[in-house]
Amino acid sequence: MKAMPQSFATGPHIITPLPGPNARRIIAEDERYMSPSYTRCYPLVVKRGRGAVVEDVDGNEFLDFSAGIAVASTGHCHPEVVAAVQRQAAELMHMSGTDFYYEQMPALARRLSQLAPMPGPHRFFYGNSGTEAIECAIKLARYHTRRQHIIAFFGGFHGRTMGALSLTASRTKQRQRFGPFVPGVTHVPYPNLYRDMYRGRLSGPEEEKAFALGCARFIEETLFRSTLPPEEVAAIVLEPIQGEGGFVVAPTNFLQEIRRICDRHGILMIVDEVQSGAGRTGKWWAIEHSGVQPDVVAIAKGIASGMPLGICMSRAEIMCWEPGSHGSTFGGNPVSLAAALATLDIVEREGLGNAEAVGNHMMERMKTWPEKQRMVGDVRGRGLMIGVEIVRDRESRTAAGPERDSIVSLAFERGLLCLGAGESAIRLTPPLIVSKEQADIAMDILEECIRAVEK
Ligand SMILES: Cc1ncc(COP(=O)(O)O)c(C=O)c1O
């Protein structure tokens, strides 16, 4: 491998016009062969990555505040993860845990059981992706409760296979022409405190609390009294922080009320921690910030640092299904499990504390942006899951989607990788090992780009 350039350790270094000549060639070929359904928002062609920096095929280096959509939790190619993957790949790559045993399966489960956001004992099912973790959770909830209906939230994103897609409600585009969906799903409002979906602006903490509580109570007081008998509801599925929906943090009183409703009616509370989990918010699971204990947790993305792994974790008595009810050929393959075990070590040792420290450092500076920058309406999040809401102006709070896209593209041109989320938010999800210095560089670039678009 060629020697690492000096700047690789810290930040961006752009040496060609973007896209460079090699990138242009690869993109042309990609456009010829690949599915047009992918949503590339700028022409980045990645060659390799180390830590929070990726290098493209023309030698340009970017500071990666996307982490491959919140997946490279320990940074790109963390040496311990690479070593674990190499060791395992040389020993056993596949055997299918559905039909055979291997020790990595219970070994990871034992570790995760110690980290679960609800008391044990627990049981685990391994798939390959976030959407599979959700498919498992939906099937499990129906099987265990013998009930059919599922409640999910507007703005929620749970994946793109038909079951998970039936819960997903963040963008019409993701559902258009794919119906009919799995029957029995009802969507209800999620408490977005920046934008009450009916009344717009909330006037202060008291109104915010009432609105959040109202969103949860709508389920009991309206749905359960008018259209949906609670004894037919298997589960309420939610993201403790909506990801694709715009990095919207669920207030604690809302989560507590959902827990109460679930307990009262024998409904399972499923939390989708695919994006918010595995240490991203400075705790292992975002739901822990509320103290609420879920029944089932869906895990993927950052849990194995980029190797494919989706996990459904539940209280043990819930995972009561018979052999043959559910399985997966590749799910929990030994290489992904080895990567997950190494990831847990690194996140425990340095990721959690760093996510909290660098996240607080970023939030401290960025929370001043709404006063300083005309187009920044809101900055929110926890740990290293931070969203910046771009608006036409702060008074109207009108979502500024095209301007958000321009800021994201400009940031790319200046060497910072970030992505959009929801209608008009920018999401920042750097690796959990990112340094304060890198965070400062990223915030400088982003601020400059926002200012440039404001002009
Ligand atoms: C909260 C959440 N759930 C589920 C998924 C689906 O995960 P995957 O793309 O691995 O299927 C995602 C992906 O972005 C997600 O953010």
Image (spheres, rainbow, N blue to C red):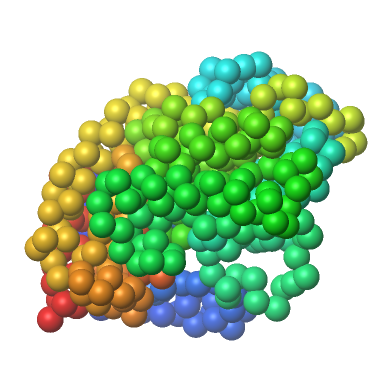
Along the line of sight, the residue nearer the viewer: 147 or 118: 147
Residue 402, compared with residue 246, is above or below; it is: below
Which quadrant of the view contains residue 339? top right
Residue 357 point in image, percent of width and height: 23, 34
Q: Residue at x 40, y 24 (%)?
A: 348
Residue 307, compared with residue 391, is above or below; it is: above
Q: Which quarter of the figure is the C terminus placed in?
A: bottom left
- Left of 233 or right of it: where is 405? left
Along the line of sight, the residue nearer the viewer: 246 or 395: 395
Q: Residue at x 35, y 55 (%)?
A: 193
Res. 50 visible in picture: no
Residue 308 point in image, percent of width and height: 60, 45
- Left of 335 or right of it: where is 205? left
Res. 147 visible in picture: yes
Residue 400, compared with residue 264, is above or below; it is: below
Along the line of sight, the residue nearer the viewer: 21 or 370: 370
Q: Residue at x 59, y 83 (%)?
A: 32
Q: Residue at x 56, y 52 (%)?
A: 218
Which quadrant of the view contains residue 23? bottom left
- Left of 310 or right of it: where is 213? left
Residue at the far left: name it.
Answer: 372
Along the line of sight, the residue nearer the viewer: 283 or 15: 283
Residue 54 point in image, percent of width and height: 34, 55
Residue 237 point in image, percent of width and height: 61, 46
